[in-house]
Image (tube, helix red, strand yellow):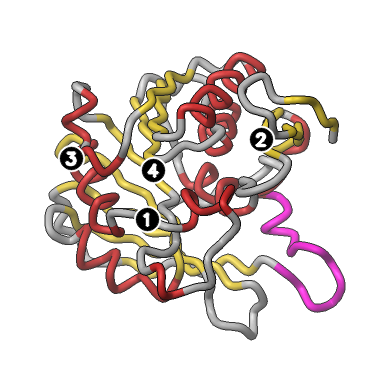
């Protein structure tokens, strides 16, 4: 890991290696840092060449850069409301030779405000909280990533508008918000597939990966869980480690 001054602000920027070194990601040294959730979200999208994919709230581009490495033929677009983070995402795209388009825009304004045609896929890692009373106030650098000012509903509305009929939406979120996600996405999407993510095999899931298909009608599928850690001593289970290194995927 190397440290360099940011060209955009007065904060330090660190450069991390992802997917076993295939991706270089510059992100703020303090505040919100993309990590495991971004890697899992990027691993779910079995994108075919030529498919158009949009990420809502792309931050510094961690998901998009990993998707670009996994699927070189995909046409990737990111939307980020923080101009400095959007600029950093553009830098990361250039650093990795990823043909990703980064737009500065607010999810709360809706997809139509972007003036784009619907995409084949939309992905998001929405802020985990939308109630300021639900947690102790996070550090200023993490506030935008942790707190959804306009609620989870604003994110699901954006995603539902962002994809064509039959298009796929994939979200990673807190496991205790699963019912809310299904209700909100279920207004215009279906054919749900859910993969629980457990910290250990004997502990409840803390995350869920949810796929929905716009206008889908197929029955809900509950997929085998992903177990992240093994109490026998390894930092990650072999399955989780393979995903983090880009050697395996999390298909729906």
Kindly identify the residue that appears in the image at 33 percent across and 30 percent down.
105
State the residue in front, 32 or 251.
Answer: 32
Q: Residue at x 37, y 55 (%)?
A: 148
The residue singled out by tag 3 in the image is 161
The answer to whether 120 appears left or right of 215 in the picture is: right
Lower position in the chain sequence, tag 3 or tag 4: 4
Frontmost residue, 11 versus 252: 11
Q: Which residues are magenta?
A: 229-242
Circle 3 crowding by C-alpha within 10 Å: few under 14, some 14–19, many from 20: some
Q: Report the residue at 38% width, 23% height from top.
A: 103
Determine which of the numbered discs, if any, sits on residue 123 in the image.
Answer: 4
Marks 3 and 2 sit apart, C-alpha to C-alpha, by 29 Å
Q: Identify which residue is drawn at 58% across, 65% down.
A: 226
Q: Identify the disc placed on residue 148.
A: 1
Q: Secondary structure at mark 2?
A: strand
Q: Residue 230 at x, y = what percent?
A: 76, 73
């Amino acid at each position: 890991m190397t440290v360099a001054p940011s060209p955009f602000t007065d904060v330090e920027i660190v450069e991390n290696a992802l997917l076993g070194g295939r991706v270089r990601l510059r992100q703020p040294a303090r505040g919100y840092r993309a990590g495991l959730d971004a890697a899992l979200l990027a691993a779910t999208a079995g994108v075919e060449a030529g498919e158009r994919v949009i990420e809502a709230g792309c931050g510094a581009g961690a998901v998009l850069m990993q998707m670009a490495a996994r699927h070189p033929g995909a046409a990737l677009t990111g939307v980020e409301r923080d101009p400095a983070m959007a600029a950093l995402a553009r830098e990361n795209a250039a650093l990795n030779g990823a043909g990703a388009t980064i737009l500065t825009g607010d999810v709360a304004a809706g997809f139509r405000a972007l003036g784009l045609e619907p995409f084949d896929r939309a992905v998001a890692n929405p802020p985990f909280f939308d109630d300021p009373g639900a947690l102790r106030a996070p550090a200023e650098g993490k506030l935008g990533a942790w707190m959804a000012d306009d609620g989870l509903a604003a994110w699901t509305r954006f995603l539902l508008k962002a994809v064509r009929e039959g298009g796929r939406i994939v979200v990673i979120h807190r496991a205790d918000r699963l019912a809310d996600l299904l209700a909100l996405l279920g207004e215009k999407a279906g054919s749900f597939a859910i993969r629980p993510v457990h910290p250990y095999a004997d502990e409840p899931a803390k995350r869920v990966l949810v796929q929905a298909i716009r206008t889908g009608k197929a029955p809900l599928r509950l997929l085998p869980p992903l177990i992240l850690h093994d109490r026998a001593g390894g930092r990650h289970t072999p399955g989780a480690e393979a995903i983090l290194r880009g050697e395996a995927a999390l298909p729906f």
